[in-house]
Image (cartoon, rainbow, N blue to C red):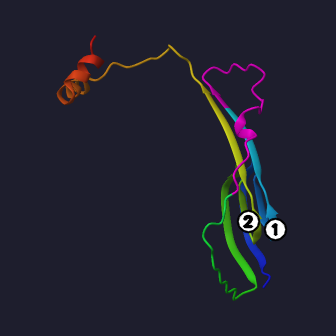
Amino acid sequence: MKRTSVVHDIKVLVCQLGSATFVGDNHVVDPRARVLAVQRELPEFLGDEGNFRYRIFHAELPAPGLETPVRLRRISESPWIRVGHVKILSVSVASVLQVGSTSIIDADNRLKQFRQLLQGIVVQAPPAPEAVEAAFRLAPIAARMAFKD
């Protein structure tokens, strides 16, 4: 039985990075996202950060196999899919929000993340006296090495 989707109210604040919002039926949905995320303590850009040469972006993904046979029996007593109020903050990074049916969803998100933090500039507060006392009580040898000053 074909079903009809009826949505009273749907609010999506953000739909981004290869994502989609659908009301109704689809045969195939294949959202994709390729993301380079660079986090630096100092905003100094070299100009070649947008290169997608990394293996993660080109590697062949293994297709999942259906290892367990599934028997499915559906009873659709109504020809309608009725949805009242839906409020979504974000649909992001190769994802799908759908009211309806889809035969095939093939989502792929690939992310390469870099964190480039400053080295050698570590500001450390002195330990509290009760913490030092507890460390010597619980692990005296390790505490002597950690607090040798």
Would you identify the image quadrant in which residue 111 lies? top right
- Rounded to the nearest whole Å, what is the CA distance between mark 1 and mark 2? 9 Å
Would you identify the image quadrant in which residue 142 lies? top left
SS assignment for the magenta stretch, majority: loop
Residues at circles 1 and 2 in contact by the CB criterion of under 8 Å: yes
- Up/down of 61 relative to 147, above or below: below
Q: Who's the residue at 75% across and 53% down the image? A: 19
Spot occupied by residue 97 in the image (x, y as percentages of width and height): 71, 61
In the image, 149 versus 103, the foreground residue is: 103
- Up/down of 121 relative to 82, above or below: above
1 vs 2, front mark: 1
* Neighbours of disc 1 within 10 Å: few (<14), some (14-19), many (20+): some
Answer left or right for 146 relative to 112.
left
Q: Which residues are magenta?
A: 38-63
Disc on the earlier residue, 1 or 2: 1
Spot occupied by residue 32 in the image (x, y as percentages of width and height): 77, 49
Residue placed under numbered mark 1 in the picture: 26
Look at the image and tell me in which quarter the C terminus lies.
Answer: top left
Q: Is residue 94 visible?
A: no
Q: Which SS class for mark 1?
A: strand
Q: Who's the residue at 60% across and 70% down the image? A: 68
Spot occupied by residue 69 in the image (x, y as percentages of width and height): 63, 74
What type is the residue that disc 2 sits on?
A: Gln
Q: Residue furthest bottom?
A: 77
Number of the label disc, if any, that sits on residue 140: none
Q: How many marks?
A: 2
Spot occupied by residue 70 in the image (x, y as percentages of width and height): 63, 75
Look at the image and tell me in which quarter the N terminus lies.
Answer: bottom right
What type is the residue that disc 1 sits on?
A: Asn
47 magenta-colored: yes
Residue placed under numbered mark 2 in the picture: 98
